[in-house]
């Protein structure tokens, strides 16, 4: 009696991958309601953006205070918050920022302007050279898309820096 097991051929196990015949349709759906207090509805100053960060971004389930996290506030034409999006989570001193990812949800939600923000886990809110370069890149991308970058706010421990106030958010 032969006790050697019989294995099926690789072709019988692994089927070739096939792409769908038709393209997909996408829809933006709110994941959760984020009530905004009345005094934060208008968000055109860095202190209001920092308050929004503390109330909503810092309490987000995926937020990690030990890593740099990038979020954007999506604003309508009256500079009122339509929503926010946690764009990227980096390491303790670096974050990957690409204009495509920053403006993706702004385009899908028809935002008129946005405020970009990220934290410095070290607690120091002074912008680095990389922060300044990223801000300038986002301004140029926003000009092309006609979506204004109002500010880039860096959040520290109990403090923040506004790149607009420092003169870096002007074309």
Image (cartoon, rainbow, N blue to C red):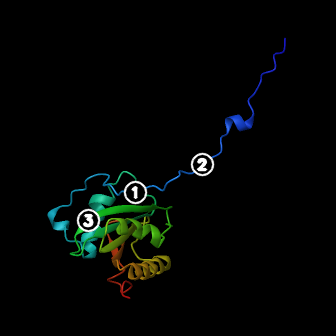
Tell me the CA gap for discs 3 and 2.
39 Å
Say which element carries label 3. Answer: strand
Along the viewing direction, whichever of 164 and 127 lies nearer the viewer: 164
Q: Is residue 77 above or below residue 104?
A: below
Residue at the outermost top position:
1
Percent coordinates x, y for residue 40 in the rendering? 20, 67
Pointer 3 residue: 82
Residue at the outermost right position:
1
Pointer 1 residue: 26
Say which element carries label 2. Answer: loop
For the point 39% across and 72% down, which residue is it? 125
Q: Quadrant of residue 50?
A: bottom left
Q: Is residue 25 above or below residue 8?
A: below
Q: Quadrant of residue 154?
A: bottom left
Tell me the CA gap for discs 2 and 1.
20 Å
Q: Is residue 136 above or below residue 55?
A: below
Q: Are marks 2 and 1 in contact (CB under 8 Å)?
A: no
């Amino acid at each position: 009696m032969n006790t050697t097991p019989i294995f099926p051929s690789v072709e019988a196990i692994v089927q070739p991958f096939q792409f769908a015949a038709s393209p997909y349709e996408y829809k933006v759906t709110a994941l959760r309601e984020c009530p905004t207090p009345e005094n934060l509805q208008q968000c055109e100053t860095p202190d209001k953006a920092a308050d929004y960060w503390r109330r909503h971004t810092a309490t987000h389930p995926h937020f990690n205070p030990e890593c740099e996290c990038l979020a954007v506030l999506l604003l309508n034409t009256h500079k009122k918050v339509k929503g926010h999006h946690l764009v990227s989570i980096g390491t303790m001193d670096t974050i990957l920022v690409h204009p495509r990812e920053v403006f993706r949800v702004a385009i899908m939600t028809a935002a008129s302007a946005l405020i970009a923000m990220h934290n410095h886990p070290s607690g120091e809110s002074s912008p680095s050279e990389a922060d300044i370069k990223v801000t300038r890149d986002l301004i140029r991308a926003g000009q092309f898309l006609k979506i204004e970058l109002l500010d880039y706010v860096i959040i520290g421990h109990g403090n923040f820096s506004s790149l607009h106030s420092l003169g870096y958010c002007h074309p």
